[in-house]
Amino acid sequence: MLKAIAKSFGGRYKGAPYRNWVIPVGAKSAVLGQLDGIGAVRET
C-alpha cells in the first residue's frame, strides 16, 4: 500500500545506502492524509 500511495504523489524509492521513499515536499500533507485514512500509525 505504501508503494502505491508514494508513487501516486510522485514519490520514488531510493536504494542503498538509505533505502527509503523520497516524496516531494509539497505532497507531504496529502501523503500523511492518505496514510491516516488507511489507519497507519506513526512510530515515535
Image (cartoon, grey):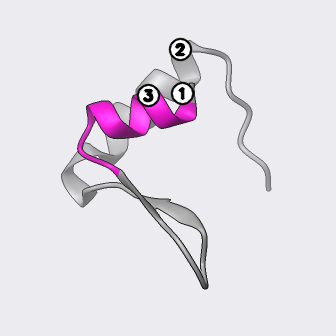
Figure quadrant of the C terminus: bottom right
Q: Amino acid at mark 1?
A: Leu
Mark 2 neighbour class, 10 Å CA radius: few under 14, some 14 to 19, many 20 or more: few
What label does residue 4 carry, if any? Answer: 3
- Please, which residue is most extreme toward the left here? 26
Q: Position of residue 2 (x, y in %)?
A: 55, 34
Q: Amino acid at mark 2?
A: Gly
What is the chief secondary structure element of the magenta stretch? helix
Nearer to the camera, 31 or 8: 8
What label does residue 24 carry, if any? Answer: none
Residue shown at 67% from the left, 17% from the top = 39
Q: Amino acid at mark 3?
A: Ala
Mark pair 2, 3: CA separation: 14 Å
Mark pair 2, 1: CA separation: 5 Å
Residue shown at 56% from the left, 23% from the top = 36
Q: Position of residue 41 (x, y in %)?
A: 74, 33
For label 2, the SS is helix
- Please, which residue is most extreme toward the front here? 16
Mark 1 neighbour class, 10 Å CA radius: few under 14, some 14 to 19, many 20 or more: some
Question: Where does the magenta region start and end?
Answer: 2-11
Residue shown at 78% from the left, 49% from the top = 43
Mark 3 neighbour class, 10 Å CA radius: few under 14, some 14 to 19, many 20 or more: few
For label 3, the SS is helix
- Say which residue label 1 marks: 35
Nearer to the camera, 41 or 6: 6
Q: Are marks 2 and 3 in contact (CB under 8 Å)?
A: no
- Please, which residue is most extreme toward the right here? 44
Figure quadrant of the N terminus: top right
Check if residue 6 falls in the magenta segment. Answer: yes
Q: Position of residue 14 (x, y in %)?
A: 46, 68
Q: Is residue 18 above or below residue 12?
A: below
Q: Are marks 3 and 1 in contact (CB under 8 Å)?
A: no
